[in-house]
Amino acid sequence: MDDLRNKIIDDIGSGYAKFGHSQLLGRVVGLLICEPEPITIDQMCKILHITKSPVNQICRRLEDLKLIRKVWVKGKRKYHYEIVPDVYLQAVVNQMSQYEDNLEMINENLKLLLKQYICENENEKLKIACQRLIAMREMHLRFTKLLFDFTEEWMKSEESFPSVEDYFEKMGLSDKVKK
């Protein structure tokens, strides 16, 4: 299991890097996805072969993003961490929030640009910039709606996801199952 766990951790880290996050952030998420029980930062460092400082920083960031949570384990003095049950939904909510923040910035700048466009007697260069910001705004509006609709559908369907056993067939492994 350790080799498979390490592959999953590394692959999730690479996936996060493709989205502009640090690979280590993705590796911590991958580790916590694989761990059935909460673990300490010291345990994370040992498994990931990394020093404590960056893992501490990443855990704080992931906590702020509500993707992991600190838990107290009876009889232990150190905090333990675990992935939140709705981590994938929370990741989409975080992304939606970023798009909404960008939309506010776009709206503010588009208003200023449109006012400038009128003041400068419909300057052609300003018109091009206006058109580009309008396209940006429209993309953000549509994508935010898409994310909202997705979260609604996800919450409704989450309880009806196929079981692990159902996935043997979906993944073409049903003939490999020991009876």
Image: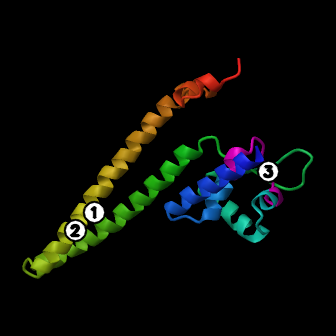
The residue at the far bottom in this view is 120
Q: On the image, numbered disc 2 is attached to which residue?
A: 132
Residue 52, by quadrant, is bottom right
CA gap between label 3 and label 1 equals: 42 Å
The chosen color scheme is rainbow
The residue at the far top in this view is 179
Q: On the image, numbered disc 1 is attached to which residue?
A: 136
Q: What numbered label is drawn on residue 166? A: none
Classify 10 Å Cα crowding around label 3: few (below 14), some (14-19), many (20 and above): some
Specify the amino acid type for callout 1. Answer: Met
The structure residue drawn at horizontal position 27% and vertical position 61%, both measured from the top left corner, is 137
The residue at the far front in this view is 175
Specify the amino acid type for callout 2. Answer: Arg
Give the residues drawn in magenta, as a range: 31-43
Specify the amino acid type for callout 3. Answer: Ile
Where residue 129 appears, as percent x and y from the top left, is 20, 74
The structure residue drawn at horizontal position 86% and vertical position 56%, both measured from the top left corner, is 78
In the drawing, does residue 26 fall left or right of residue 131? right
CA gap between label 1 and label 2 equals: 6 Å
Classify 10 Å Cα crowding around label 1: few (below 14), some (14-19), many (20 and above): some
Say whether residue 82 is visible. no
Q: On the image, numbered disc 3 is attached to which residue?
A: 39
The structure residue drawn at horizontal position 50% and vertical position 61%, both measured from the top left corner, is 18
